[in-house]
Every structure is written in structure tokens, then in C-alpha cells.
Amino acid sequence: MNDLRRAGRLAAELAADHLAAVPGGPVWQPVPDEDRSWLSGQPLPTAGRPLGDLLHDVSDHVLPYPMGNGHPRFFGWVNSPPSPAGVLVAPLAAALNPSCAGGDHAGVLLERTAVRWLAELVGYPHPPGAGLLTSGTSMATVISLATARQRAARQDGWDAREAGLYRRRPLTMYISAEGHSCLRKAAELLGLGSRHIRTVPVDDAFRMETAALRHLITADTDAGLRPFYVAASAGTVNTGAVDPLADIAEIAYEHDLWFHVDGAYGALGVLAEGADPGYAGLHRADSLALDPHKWLGVPVDCGCILFRHAAEPRDAFSLIPPYLRDDDTDELGWFSEYGPEQTRPLRALRVWATIAHLGRDGVVQLVRHTTGLARTLAAMVEAADDFDLLAPVTTSVTAFRYRPPATTPDEVEALNQALPTAVQRRGRAFLTGTRLSGVAAMRACILHPATTEADLTILLNEIRAAAQEVQ
């Protein structure tokens, strides 16, 4: 135990020193060949080594090469810095090392609170038991889609778990052209088949077109197919767009479709000042996925799936062996009855600590700070004569492109394809590229509470400087 105490203190110092040094270092840097070889090519050791030696290796070879998301000028993908409270309690969760499949212990009980807090933050109804923490929204989507599949089968007089999908009327689902790839992956994984996924066009603001959704549902019904699921976005990855959730909810209700909202990144945007009116229908969703490890900064991995009715996911997943059954003391059932995971880690401690540390006011402040900066960046882009804003800002993502004077469309396209990597390699800022309306674009996702307007100025200047290198 003395070795563990000494190593634990050293680990805490390394973590604190690393986080303190991040803002003053490069956002990202390539891993040199020597360290790359050490990281990926180590032989299996024959003899063990002291804990302290392991930490020195981490200090020398791992900590110098982060992804970059701890830095205030990291604007790539949707990856937040870790919350201090989440970092603090992560070793304690590891020390407990429970399985949160179920049972009567702190990890399970705390997850009830963590899930309820998340539902309360975004204004989603939460009956007891109607939600659980997951590895992320990819798994949350699998759980949602499997639950919807089982409900549709029950409505049609059969059991999807027992009979499978063999020789059944094909189930069709509807996703936006801006919908996340996890929706398609879940459909393929669950045997629904990508040919039965309908991609709904988006409007000029990259929101799902509800008239097109109605048309696709009607066409599939007339063709003898079984529409059953529509997934809307509350904050897309590309632009942060929020689909017209209230209108989509109404269409889903009219056609008896399961209404799912992918709020992995953007559900917390409902707390922004002047939040997008599209959030108005969020509470009507049959299921809502959100990722505490995104905007909230809960250390990875931690997603969440919420349901309007607790009985529906339990019908889709519960399969209890006798040695796990405890009907007298656990009326809600084990968490493993509501999803595919049996051994489940203690994710709740990181969620609880992060939210408890911030409080609701702190979460609101974080959301409003980052959404405000996204609007500021959009204004800076529009005021510049060498940038174009490509989408309205509705959450904390700003999508734009670089268009220097006297360049042809082909040159602008090639330049915007090359710029994200060039900016990353310079090390002073980090953003990623995408495609919008068929053209290469850049997107900056702002999630760091310490990001300032000065960081946005550096970002635009870094893009200009990188352009000189690649032209």
C-alpha cells in the first residue's frame, strides 16, 4: 500500500502539472518516430515493474502527445476538455471498481441521480428507471433503435427478440442528411439494413425538411413497407443545427413512429440565451441521447439514453438469470435489463461530480459562454473580406470557409481541403474540415470554458498563415 500511496501522489501531481501546462503548449504536435515506436511497438514484458517507473514512462511518452482537446484553442470535432471534478474522482471510481449492472450499492444508486439530473438540465421528462448511462451516443442509439424495433413488432403482433426480422415487412427509418453516422451503424448492426434507411433532405440552414419527411413516409407506406422510426438532431456535428423538433414530433405522432432525438452534442444548447426555437419539441421525444462527455466535459467515456417510458427498453433487453433476480428489493430492475451491457463501469461518479461542481448555474454559464463565442466568431468571419460564413450559428459550432481575394472556385476548394491539416500541424490552433452543400468547409466547435475572443482571432490568423504555406 505504501507504493500505491507514493505512486498515487505522483500521479496526481502529473495530472495537475499536465493540465496547468496545456494552455501554454502546442495544441497538438505529431508524435516523433522514437516515441511512436515506443507507444505502438513495445514487446510484452516478462517481468513486472514498479508503479513509479510506469508513471515516469507515462510522463515521458504519453502526456507530451495529447489529442489536443484540453487546450482553449482546440476547435476540432466535438471533444471537450476534462472537467476538474471528473478528473479528481476518476481514480476513486477505479478504486471501487464495481459492476453497475445492478445490485444495492453506491454506484447503482448514484446513477439514478446522475441520469435524473441530466434529464432535468435539458427539460426532458424522466419517470424513474427511464434512462441509463452508456459508453456514448453510439451505444445509446443502439439501445433506442432496438427498443423502437421491439415496440413496432409488438404493435404488429410479433416479438422481434424471439422471431428476428426474417420474412417480415421491412422496417424503414428516417434520418436527416446531416444525421450522425451512428444512426446508420446502429441500423446495420440491428439487421434493419441500410437500404431501408431514408435520408431526408435539409433546408438552407441544414435542418430536416419536414415536407420531405412526410412524403417519404407516405411513399413507404404506399409501397407496403413499415415506417417505424425517425431520428432528429438537436445540434448536428457539422453546423450545430437543430431540426424542427416540434414539427417532427407531430409527424411521428400522426404516423405512429418512434421519435428519437440525437442530442449527443447539442441537447444542452437548450440552456443557451435565446435558444433555438427548434428545441421546443424536445420533451416529446420517445428517446433522447446525449453525451455528458461532450459539452459537460465529463471524462470519456460517458453517454446517456433517456426514455419517456421505462417499460419499453426493459421489454427490449431484459433477460435475467435466476442468480441476478431480486424482485423484492429492486422494483426498477437492474440497469442491465435496459441495455446490452452486463458488466457496466461506474460512470455516474464522474457525471455526479461534474454537475455537482458546476451546479445548474455553472452549466448554464458554460453553455452561454461557448455559444456566445460561436456567434462572435461568426461575426468576425462575416466582417472579414477573406472568409465566408456557411451556416447560421445555433449552438457552439461555426461553419465557414476561407476565400482569399482573386482566387478561383477550384482554388478555394483545394485550399479549404488542405487548410485543416495545415493549421493543426502549426500547433497554435486546431480545427477540422467537413463538406457542406457539396463544398469543402471548416468548422470550429467551441466547448472550452477558458476559450476567449483573443483565441478566435488567433484561429483566423492561423488559417491565413497556413494558407500561405499550402498555396
Image (cartoon, rainbow, N blue to C red):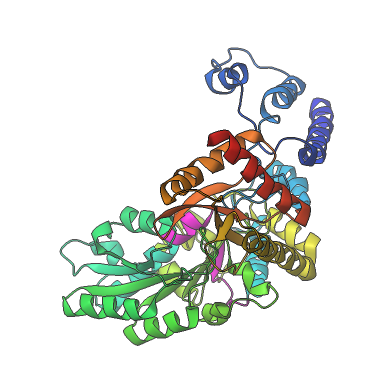
Report the front residue among 466 and 316.
466
In the image, 425 versus 301, the foreground residue is 425
Magenta-colored stretch includes residue 267 = no
Residue 213 locus on image (x, y percent): 34, 76
Say whether residue 329 is visible. no
Q: Residue at x 61, y 54 (%)?
A: 444
Side (left or right) of 238 relative to 52: left
Q: Is residue 462 above or below residue 368?
A: above
Lateral position of residue 351 relative to residue 323, left or right: right
Please identify the residue farthest to the front as the structure is shown.
406
Residue situated in front as seen by the camera: 400 or 10: 400
Asked whether 130 falls inside the magenta stretch, the response is: yes
**Occupied quadrant, residue 359:** bottom right
In this orientation, which residue lies closer to the viewer: 60 or 73?
A: 73
* Range covered by the magenta-colored residues: 123-142
Q: Residue at x 83, y 31 (%)?
A: 5
